[in-house]
Structures are given as structure tokens and as C-alpha cells.
Image (tube, rainbow, N blue to C red):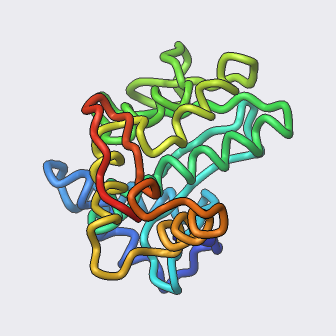
Amino acid sequence: MIHRLRPAESSDFDWLLALHRESRAHDDPGRVRAELTRAFATRDYQVVEVDGEPVGVLVVDWEAEPAVLWTVEVAPAWQGRGLGTRLVHDLLLQARQRERAVVAPLEPGAPALAMLRRLGFWPREGAPGPGLCLRWDAGPRTELTLRAAVSPWADPARRRAWAWRLFEPAPDEQVGFARFVAGRHGLPAEAAVLDLHAGTGRRLRPL
């Protein structure tokens, strides 16, 4: 799965509003629209696309110190595929190169909370707004955390998504590449398998 980021345009507003309401279904629709209208006018919204289709949004303020991750949202149909993790992972690689810390203000119980904690964010005081504030700082500890977090076995939802790919009628390019490598190295069909190592001790099937 290859994604790209592009600056949001005014024509994206209705789609962004629908996406925002998905994660705030219990909030007043008028309030959600008003908040997005204010934020859309002042923040750098980046639309995430896959094959030309909008599938998510990323909002980061690099002008602030520390940098602020305001929003990372993925459309429901694309959740559970590791896209949100990849977006934040790439952001943190940029932050490390720039020697910048990143804070993420969140509402209590926000869907992104577990993902950000897995990527090395920790609760801190001083949120630039109401609610909870998480902070990420570059260092040896967070380097190891980043490596572990992008593994497909880092959480159960992603393990299921990757396992399912092997049972699809038309395996994707990565599975096909694994078959190619196995063939180049002369591995017999019965040996060319994916070993999950996900606590079950089982292998799936020949590649």
C-alpha cells in the first residue's frame, strides 16, 4: 500500500467534516462543524490518498516548539491496516532528523491514544488546549519503540490484517515478492511458509 500526502483544498472540507464526525459521533454536529471550520482556516491540513482516493488526514504544526500533532485520522474502511501507524512513524522520523520533540493534544479516550502510546508518546503536562497531552522525544528508547511499532505483529488488529492477506484470492505484491525470493533461493514449496510467531506457534500455509 503506497500513500501520498497533499495539501487540503476547500473542496475537501465536506469530506473532512464527514471523517471528523465519524470519530465524534456523540458530539453536537454544529459544534464539530464550527471547530473544523476554525481549524481548517488556520492549520496545515494534509489529505492522505491511496490510488487517488482520500483515506485520511494529518495535521502537524512544525512552526510551534515543540511541534504539534493536531490530528491523525483514517477513514473507517482503511482502519486496521497500519496506515495511521505509518503516518505517525514517518512524522516522527522527520522530527528525529530535525531534532524536534512532538506533542499531541488529545481528548480523553481518543481513538489515537493507544497508537501514540505504542509509538513512544508519554503523558505530559501543558497541553496546548483542553484534554490530555502526550509528548514524544527522540532518543535511543524511542528508536527501539519505533522499530517495534511498525512491525505487523505489534498489535492484534494488524496481525489479523496481515494474516488475512495470505488467504485472499489474489495475494498482494509483498506476498508475491516473498514467493519470488523463496523460489530464487531454491526453497521447496513446503518450506516456503509464513511463520506468524504471534503466540500460537503455528504456520499458515505454503507461499
Quadrant (top left/top right/bottom left/bottom right) for the C terminus? bottom left
Q: Residue furthest top?
A: 125
Q: Is residue 162 above or below residue 129?
A: below
Pick the front one: 193 or 158: 193
Coordinates of residue 16 in the picture (x, y in percent): 40, 70
The answer, for residue 166, to whether it is visible in the render is yes
Q: Tell me what residue is drawn at x 41 percent, y 34 percent.
A: 106
Q: Is residue 18 above or below residue 187?
A: below
Specify whether 2 is left or right of 175: right
Q: Tell me what residue is drawn at x 63 percent, y 50 percent.
A: 60
Coordinates of residue 107 in the picture (x, y in percent): 34, 33
Pick the front one: 36 or 15: 15
Q: Tell me what residue is drawn at x 17 percent, y 54 percent.
A: 25
Pick the front one: 35 or 15: 15
Quarter of the rendering containing residue 15 = bottom left
Pick the front one: 207 or 133: 207
Q: Tell me what residue is drawn at x 85 percent, y 39 percent.
A: 97
Q: Is residue 56 above or below residue 93?
A: below
Q: Residue furthest right?
A: 98
Coordinates of residue 44 in the picture (x, y in percent): 64, 60
The answer, for residue 2, to whether it is visible in the render is no
Quarter of the rendering containing residue 79 = bottom left
Specify whether 102 is left or right of 31: right
